Image (tube, rainbow, N blue to C red):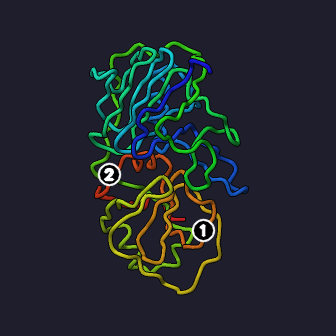
Amino acid sequence: MTDRALAVVRAGALTTVQDQGRPGHAHLGVPRSGALDAPAAALVNRLVGNPPEAALLETTLNGCDVRPRSAVIVAVGGAPCPVTVDGRPAAWGAPVRVPAGSLLSVGTAVSGVRSYVGVSGGVAVEPVLGSRSTDLLSGLGPPPLTDGMVLPLGTPMAPHARVDVVPQPRPPAELVLRVTLGPRDDWFTTAAIHTLTTHPYRVSSASNRIGLRTEGPALERARPGELPSEGMVLGAIQVPPDGRPVVFLADHPTTGGYPVIAVVRPDDLPATAQATPGTPVRFVVVRHR
């Protein structure tokens, strides 16, 4: 067995392999997937000398522990967290050399939700439809990490960055999401539109890679009945029967039967990856359809 590999010692609450995802397959019923905080993932790849499309690890809340079988350069970014190598403190947000057989521990997030672990050479699991991303909804890609799993690594292609530390955005104290109303805003009352755009919501603990669920006032329908299933896009704000908005994220279904009241601008979606339960959410209309 090759020595270019990572052995998973502690998988954590939910750690998955992610890259830039598999866009362009929605017509086949395949979600986009990919790293929820794409800028953070791209940055740690740059720090270890990987190309932007290299696969890495996305942890959730309590990190993970891995042991490389050969010396590697790693960088941890996204949600701030303690990093140690064989129990000794190591840098967060900067390249770190991890000797063969040493234990890299990525700890519990101090703030935010998802940390990213880039490894020189990238995680080289078998791609599916051009991507190595784990898709929790469809089951495509590698399964979430489990203790004892061994992940193959690719060959490093470039030297790592020569920096001490790189600034990264802090997790949001308030999530401000700019939206375009529609395409089904006419399914809601004028009062519901006013509520959505003026009343603060909060991130629900039921949020995941499929969607950011919210807590707050229910949005009133202007018409009864069911909407025929139709295509869904990344950032769509779907309103299920309980009336609480759900923002569709990377692993969202490609079709749905609940009305979409608005769509979030793509530039605002990375911050949703780091919004902890209870974070205030404001929807701001920037363009009407």
* Quadrant position of residue 154: top right
Residue plotted at (59% across, 16% down): 157
Residue plotted at (57% across, 56% down): 137
Between discs 2 and 1, the one toward the N terminus: 1
Q: Residues within 10 Å of mark 1 (few under 14, many from 20)?
A: some
Q: Residues within 10 Å of mark 2 (few under 14, many from 20)?
A: many
Residue 256 has which mark?
Answer: 1
151, above or below 2, in the image: below
Q: Where is residue 4 shown, x and y percent of the image?
A: 57, 19
Q: Where is residue 160 shown, x and y percent of the image?
A: 47, 15
Q: Is residue 23 left or right of residue 79?
A: right
Q: Amino acid at mark 1?
A: Gly
127, above or below 206, in the image: above
Q: Where is residue 240 shown, x and y percent of the image?
A: 48, 73
- Describe the element under mark 2 as helix, strand or loop: loop
Q: Is residue 277 left or right of residue 98?
A: left
Q: Amino acid at mark 2?
A: Thr
Q: Nearer the viewer, residue 186 or 53?
A: 53
- Describe the element under mark 1 as helix, strand or loop: strand
Q: Which quarter of the image is occupied by the C terminus?
A: bottom right
Q: Nearer the viewer, residue 17 or 36?
A: 17
Residue plotted at (48% across, 52% down): 209
215, above or below 52, in the image: below
Name the residue carrying label 2: 276
Q: Which quarter of the image is occupied by the N terminus?
A: top right
Residue that sits furthest to the bottom in the current view: 224
All told, the count of numbered labels is 2
How far apart are the two marked residues, 2 and 1, measured between alpha carbons?
26 Å
Q: Where is residue 259 shown, x and y percent of the image?
A: 54, 73
